[in-house]
Amino acid sequence: MSFVHPIVMAGFYYLLFLQRNLGKQIIELKERSPEYENRSQLVQKHKSYAFILLGVIFAGMIGGILVTSYLLQSPMPLFYTYGHGFFGILSLAIIIAIVVLGFNIKNVIRPKIKNRFLQFHINMVYLVAIFGVFSLLTGVLTLTWGLSQ
């Protein structure tokens, strides 16, 4: 059971990496290139990856709370995991913000503002990766030392 979570999270971060690469590929498409015809399919795939990422991290949050409270008998699930749960919730919040930004990029009309909006959307992925490193470290602490007292 303790190895299911790291395997799922490795898959999550691999999908996040694929999502980032797909987004960069969409941005680099030029209107006159022959690949531009497939842009709508790539955007749709990008959106579906976003919903998969949201679903995995939301299920992980609910599963983590349930496992910590019922199986590990922790009275307050988020407070006894060395911050692991908090980093997961922060990652969920950032991914929700990324999805909302992604859906609203097409509504921005001015090119300069749209470029800044898009750059912010891209850079937030790195914030999820940073929280992922902290989550990994606190997860290892929880697995090795058990719940904090």
Image: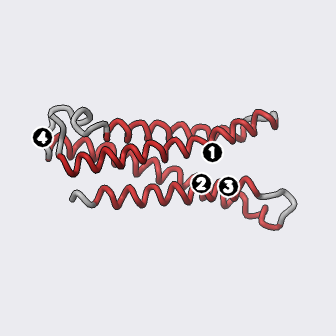
In the picture as drawn, the residue positioned furthest to the right comes out as: 32
Q: Which of 130 and 14 is in front in this view?
A: 130
Q: Which badge, 2 or 1, comes first in the chain's sequence?
A: 2
Q: Which of marks 1 and 4 is nearer the N terminus?
A: 4
Q: In which quarter of the image is the C terminus?
A: top left
Say which residue appears at 15% left-offset and 43% top-offset. 70
Q: Which of marks 4 and 3 is nearer the N terminus?
A: 3
Check whether the beta carbons of the residues at disc 2 and disc 1 lie within 8 A of each other.
Answer: yes
Please tell me how crowded label 3 is: few (under 14), some (14-19), or many (20+) other residues with Cα within 10 Å: few
Quadrant in the picture for the N terminus: bottom left
Q: What element carries label 1?
A: helix
Q: How far apart are marks 4 and 2 (CA)?
A: 38 Å
What is the x, y in percent for residue 20? 59, 54
Horizontal and vertical percent for residue 60? 34, 48
What distance separates the C-alpha of mark 1 from that of mark 4? 39 Å
SS class, disc 3: helix
Give the mark nearer the N terminus: 3 vs 1. 3
The residue where tag 2 is placed is 20
Residue placed under numbered mark 1 in the picture: 122
55 to the left or right of 75: right
Q: Name the residue under label 4.
A: 73
Badges 2 and 3: C-beta atoms under 8 Å apart? Answer: yes
In the image, is residue 3 above or below residue 91?
below
Q: Do the residues labelled 3 and 1 touch (CB within 8 Å)?
A: yes
Between the C-alphas of marks 4 and 3, the distance is 44 Å
User: What is the quadrant of residue 99 in the picture?
Assistant: top right
At x 20%, y 43%, the residue is 68
Amino acid beneath label 3: Lys
According to the picture, the residue beneath numbered tag 3 turns out to be 24
Which amino acid type is shown beneath numbered disc 1? Ile
